[in-house]
Image (spheres, rainbow, N blue to C red):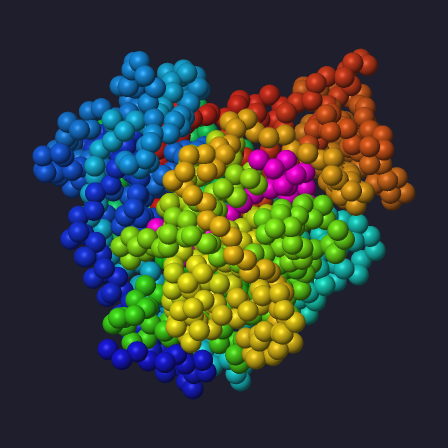
Amino acid sequence: MMEVSPIYSFSSVAEFARIHKAGTENEFLQDARLIDEINAQGFKFDAWLITRIRQTTKRSEYLLLVQPGSHGEGKMPSQGAGGKVRVAFADGTFSAYWDVARIENPVALLGSSSSPLGKLPAYKVTVPTAQYHEVLDKPIFASTGSSPSSTAASPTHLSPEASSSPTKNSLDSSAVNRPGPDRDFHDHKSTLYPAPGLSLELNPIDVIKVNFHLFASESTKDSEIGALESLYGRHQNATDRQLDAFSYFVTLKNPAFVVNVYEQLPHMKKALDRPGWHNTSLGKRFQMLNAQQKEAYLHGFEHLPCGICILPGGPGAGKTHFNLFTIAMAQSEPMARLGKRQNDSAKVLFIVDMNSPVDDVANRMVRLYQDLGMKKSIIRMKGWGSEVRRSDKLNQAEDAAAGEIVNVDFTNQFLATVKEMTTGNPPTATCKAPSLDEAAWKRYEEYQDTQYESIKKYMDEELFGKEESLVVPLRFRNLVYSLYRDTLADADFIATTPVAAANHFKGMFKPDLVFFDESPHARELCNLIAIANFNPIVWIFCGDHRQTVPYVGSAGSGSENPYARQMQVSMMERAARAGVIRHELLINHRAYGNLHRLASGLWYDGRMVSGTAQTTNRPLVHVRNYLSRTIGSKPCGVPRLVVHLKGSVGEKVEGTSCWNPSHTAWVMARVKELLADQHFRKPDRMEPGTILIISPYKSAFHHYKKELKKLPQWAQKRVEARTVDVSQGHEAEFVFLDLSKDRSTDFLDDPNRLCVALTRARLGEVVMMSGNMIYSDHFNNRSKHLRRMYAACIDRSTPATSENGNENGLLAGNGHVVWLYAENAESEGWSTPLSEDRPTMAYDDLDEIDQSALLHRTATEALAAQQKRNEAFYRRSTTRKINQEAYNWLMGMEADDVQEKNSVQGEECVQEEDGVQGKEGVEENNVVQGQGIDQKQECIVEKETEGDERSSDRKGCVGVKDHGQEKNCVKEMECTEKEGPAVEVEMGSETSIEGLALLACYIGRLGSSLAD
């Protein structure tokens, strides 16, 4: 079928609708054919049956961890997609097919995402009692709290690759034995917790082979086609305003109206003119915005055509940081509105077309609300989940008899949450955004004796006293539906996926601002979900069309979808070509040493500039010197090398992918050198540097992952491997890009992939390129972008050309092209192994600027943390007199006093005695350090936040002086997700449960956390 050339300027809405509807239908037809091909191949995966997580009279549910291996996760059910699984036996026979659903890995949910166990795909397997098989008799971790392998004399291991050597990775469950559910929600008495000190490890002996049967998901297609038909076609039911916005979205000209956000949210601008506002938390954050961010904030939300704002942002430009600040400003004061919610602030819907960023942005918003002292209701929701659909089917008979059907059934999620919360082990308060189920439970607990008394009565008297029934009475389902509807209606901020936003969502939550982040990653019909389902003040589409294009599985050579190339064009790219984008964020805060300059000239017409300090940075100088030594002590200005290896064995083809053993050996040798280097650290904080290895090919990615697993545990935490397609949003101090192939291809020459790959590094970058590639016909005649990148890294005076042909946009000398000798991986001792002991970081190279910046940042963040604790102290006091006196003492300082405190480079540590409530008075003491920051005594916890912006959460210690004797600082719970063991909770609360002992608390969430 002949492929149609993409259209960048549509003449009519009808043309747009015809092309995109046909393209979307073809896309999903090809998806269905691909799934049939995968099912026919019968791939088998190594898996571990971990434990039984639920048992009823009619079915049992099990936790299964699966190793993707060389097949990859594309051959396994994804989140939100249905599927079946069966066990393959050695004699060639199989068990029956059982329902399987992808879930969030419980190990990762427990905060152990760095553990190899936490990175394995996790599935919930549902086995009807009638289909029970003896293979299910021996899970690794028995539900009674004992492990079948716990009596083994030798330790067990996790072996991700059957061909690789086992690597020990244990997961301890050291929590005490606590009561919890083992049956369904009708039985609270049985337990699912392990015995104290039980250690769970995975052993190759325990491996079972499983085979999946995939189903084609219709939810995405239905959501996208449904959005189009809502705006154009026989099912059209949108408002005139939405139809006008749709028309402008398509044609990008002749808007029917314009919107000025500042007219409906005037405080977003007026607050800046108030005396003293710039000394507030929001004011200080505004001052920290760069010039382009300030310009976009002050003028980017006025005169918006049909209420559509298009805001591109380059790599490291702080797009998410800017969006969250804008949201906080919009919600900082109530907005004028009619009806019952006159005093409500603006409601925000934040849509991301990927599951992981939904959690990230929601958690960052929670931390921002806490830092600003804003009490807002926030929900993260990645989908309704298969539990809803299953519950719908189970209750169809009763619905038909009753003649009344609720829009969506929430009962399964709610009852699972009831079980989780009523076992005596509710999740401790953290900075993690609650799911919809958790938010609904919180609301129910608050109003169970008033507004939701009927639900409480129903559960107490009727529900839990009966034997399990798959049919839940309609009356109870309606009550639970009302609870969830109220929870959504009262939310201030919801982060979700487009499919979840399209399904039953629009009638429950009515946002005033809709953000669609990374919109170029989503197809145009997916972008339309925001317009078709919501009618806010403004739709804000963010992202970077130069780095990413919409994912279209049917694209590529041999595609049977004639509109595949059209579907890879984003609305933001069309808007850029039409010249209707007024503001862009192109100040790069990621790259040091002019690393940004190459991408700026190639794809940003030289307009992306550096936002990092121009002063000499010692970590940058150290990386430059390291690269200089690597190439024979030649000066290295821009810290980027394009490396050709002499004696390379060349690429090795594996299926449709490839890798280069010589590249892998050379890169791993350099990785070990950097990891062992005491002076390799971050440019802006006192932490060891990180490394990112990326390749366009999955085979190379898997070989790097295999090599990284041989490193000590401390080293594995500092280096990771990714494919280019999943590298956007990630960064590291040093990046290795392995092109792997001996010849260039259209795939390698893709400008979007190259833009992503060449903008991840902060301090240094190495591009591994075969020496044969530059002599290939494809490279010299068809590889436009690779050839220009290569020319720009040759140190010569002749300028290379930029994307638009402007020779001034891209200068040569953006790196060094060098020929080096390949490592001989076959020779013994070719690479020195790393010590099991973590190297001590050397900070003796700190210059005056580094020291000053460290002290200033520490003092500033210490004062901010102290203000938060002061406010918390006021809230905890119950006696009004004590409240007022303490508040006056803590918060009533004059501006001069604030300035005086800011001049003190140290941290105030106030210690508060437990049980202060109800006393006549409180004696307090401020411990202020001198001019220096004593690293041994400062009680600051620093956490790096992933994404475009780097930030740190620091908490000081709080204490009270009791009769002149200072007590030890009470550990406060971190406001960040931290790898490793759980952190103790503030003021002597129960410590959070560690290890798989917490599995029972997540029983109900395993199904409801599925993403559509």
The residue shown at (63%, 30%) is 840
Residue 1002, image x and y in percent?
Answer: 38, 33
Q: Nearer the viewer, residue 738 or 153?
A: 738
How many callouts does the rendering have? Answer: 0
In the rendered structure, the answer to whether residue 360 lies left or right of residue 932 reads left
Q: Where residue 802 appears, x then y in whole percent? A: 57, 74
Residue furthest right in the image = 896
Give the residue at x 29% y 15%: 152
Which residue is nearer to you in this view: 718 or 269?
718
Residue at image x 41%, y 81%?
Answer: 7
Residue 498 sits in quarter = bottom left
- The residue depicted at 31 percent of the width and 43 percent of the height is 68
Camera-side residue: 558 or 271? 558
Residue 671 against residue 798 in the figure, above or below: above
x and y percent of residue 984 in the render? 57, 25
Q: Quadrant of the N terminus?
A: bottom left
First to last magenta residue range? 676-699
- Magenta residue check for 688: yes
**315 displayed left or right of 274:** left
In the image, residue 43 above or below residue 115: below
- Residue 436 highlighted magenta (yes or no): no
Q: Residue furthest bottom?
A: 11
List x then y, in percent, for residue 437.
42, 42
